[in-house]
Image (cartoon, rainbow, N blue to C red):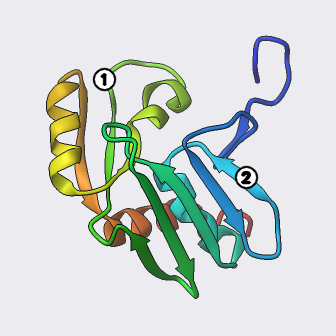
Amino acid sequence: MDENGAIASAYPFSTAPTPHQVRITDGPVVHAMCAVDALGLAAMLDTDIEVTSSDPLTHAPITVTIRDQHLSSDPASAVVFVGGQATQGPSADTCCNYLNFFTDRSTAARWATDHPHIGGEILDLPQAHTLGNQIFANLIE
């Protein structure tokens, strides 16, 4: 809830725009709280999706498509940094801002070096997709 008592997010969805826009096949365009949340939506909703985002360091566009749980991306070298602050609080504040797509591993590593207070690791897209599926695949059931 936000400071006015309105719904701010309902994982994995955000009511406010985020860097991770998800086009749901035969459905709406929504915003995901983070890159991993976006990747888990296809399994959660049992449908195909297209995610558009951008590299937080270079601002280069990144598109990830999931069709029948098969993943493709542009650029093909895209990765996900999965991290968070070592503080207490809602994951929306301590993690979501730090789970992002990057155009490649070296860009993600450079971002991590520039943000030493954010612990985490770089995952290849298939690894990040598996993580999203583990979190969200059975959520509705």
Dot 1, how many residues are within 10 Å of its Cα: few (below 14), some (14-19), or many (20+)? few
Quarter where residue 109 is shown: top left
Taking 136 as reference, is 12 above or below it? above
Check residue 30 in the rendering and tell me which mark sits there, or answer none: 2
Between 77 and 124, the residue placed more toward the observer is 77
Amino acid marked by disc 2: Val
Query: Looking at the rendering, in which quadrant would you find the N terminus?
Result: top right
Q: Indicate the position of residue 141 as horizontal and vertical percent values.
A: 73, 70
Between 17 and 129, the residue placed more toward the observer is 17
Q: Which residue is mark 1?
A: 86
Please give the name of the residue rendered at 81% of the width and 61% of the height, measured from the top-left corner: 28
Quarter where residue 94 is shown: top left
- In this rendering, which labeled residue sits more in front, label 1 or label 2? 2
Dot 2, how many residues are within 10 Å of its Cα: few (below 14), some (14-19), or many (20+)? many
Q: Secondary structure at mark 1?
A: loop
Q: Indicate the position of residue 3 as horizontal and vertical percent values.
A: 77, 11
Please give the name of the residue rendered at 53% of the width and 83% of the height, measured from the top-left corner: 69
Q: Secondary structure at mark 2?
A: strand
Mark positioned earlier in the residue sequence (1 or 2):
2
Please give the name of the residue rendered at 48% of the width and 36% of the height, measured from the top-left corner: 96
Amino acid marked by disc 1: Ala
The residue most toward the bottom is 68
Q: Indicate the position of residue 117 as horizontal and vertical percent values.
A: 23, 21
Residue 35 as seen in the image, left or right of residue 141:
left
The residue most toward the top is 3
Residue 105 as seen in the image, left or right of residue 34:
left
Q: Indicate the position of residue 129 as horizontal and vertical percent values.
A: 43, 68
Please give the name of the residue rendered at 54% of the width and 42% of the height, measured from the top-left corner: 19
How far apart are the alpha carbons under marks 1 and 2?
29 Å
Check residue 58 in the rendering and tell me which mark sits there, or answer none: none
- CB atoms at circles 1 and 2 under 8 Å apart? no
